[in-house]
């Protein structure tokens, strides 16, 4: 099946989307939510592009490379934001984003 050749990247995308969803929800429970507004926005954007990229790969779309390139860029941006915060959920999200970005760059190449 077409999606088998993308398995590692699809898995990384879904793991990243879950980590971003968790991070956004956890940020909303923190005391200074306003300080985390950008983190929450990027978490939501990153989760969405990761799910989109996984779908493109599952369908073996002709646009996989372009979507994966964009996904890697957004994952890097989200990771950089999350790395600025001391919360455990932000640190875990940043790690998932970095792994996903790496996998997506391989797909985009």
Image (cartoon, grey):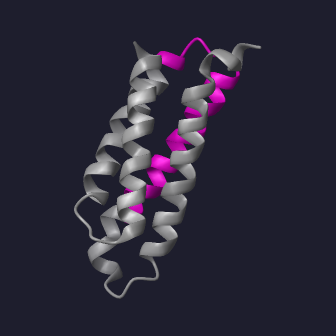
Where 43 sits versus 40, above or below? above
In the picture, measured across the screen, residue 11 lies left or right of residue 41, that is right
- Image quadrant where one finds the C terminus: top left
Locate the N terminus and report the quarter of the image it occupies. Answer: top right
Quadrant of the rendered structure where residue 87 is? bottom left
Q: Is residue 95 above or below residue 9?
A: below
- Looking at the picture, tell me which residue is in the foreground, 47 or 7: 7
Q: Is residue 60 visible?
A: no
Quarter occupied by residue 84: bottom left
Q: What residue sits 36% from the left and 41% below the top?
A: 98
Q: Considering only vertical position in the picture, is 36 above or below 72?
A: below
Residue 15, horizontal then vertical, whole percent: 56, 46
At a point 51% along the width and 40% down the height, the residue shown is 49
The reply to whether residue 45 is visible in this rendering is yes
**Image side of residue 93 versus residue 38, left or right:** right
Please say whether residue 71 is one of the residues in the magenta stretch.
Answer: no
**Percent from the top left, x then y, of residue 48?**
54, 46
Q: Is residue 47 magenta?
A: yes
Bounds of the magenta segment: 40-65
**Main SS, magenta residues:** helix
Looking at the image, residue 71 sits to the left or right of residue 58; the answer is left
The answer to which quarter of the image holds residue 55 is top right
Coordinates of residue 107 in the picture (x, y in percent): 47, 18
Q: Residue at x 60, y 43 (%)?
A: 14
Q: Is residue 101 positioned above or below 35 on the image? A: above
- The residue most toward the bottom is 31
Of 67 and 97, which appears nearest the observer?
A: 97
């Amino acid at each position: 099946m077409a999606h088998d050749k993308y398995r590692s990247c699809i898995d990384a995308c879904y793991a990243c989307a879950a980590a971003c969803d968790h991070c956004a929800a956890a940020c909303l429970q923190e005391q200074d939510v306003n300080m985390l507004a950008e983190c929450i926005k990027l978490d939501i954007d990153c989760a969405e592009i990761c799910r989109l990229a996984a779908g493109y790969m599952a369908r073996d779309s002709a646009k996989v490379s372009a979507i994966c390139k964009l996904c890697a860029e957004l994952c890097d941006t989200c990771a950089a934001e999350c790395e600025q915060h001391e919360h455990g959920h932000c640190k875990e999200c940043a790690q998932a984003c970095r792994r996903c970005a790496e996998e997506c760059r391989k797909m985009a190449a």
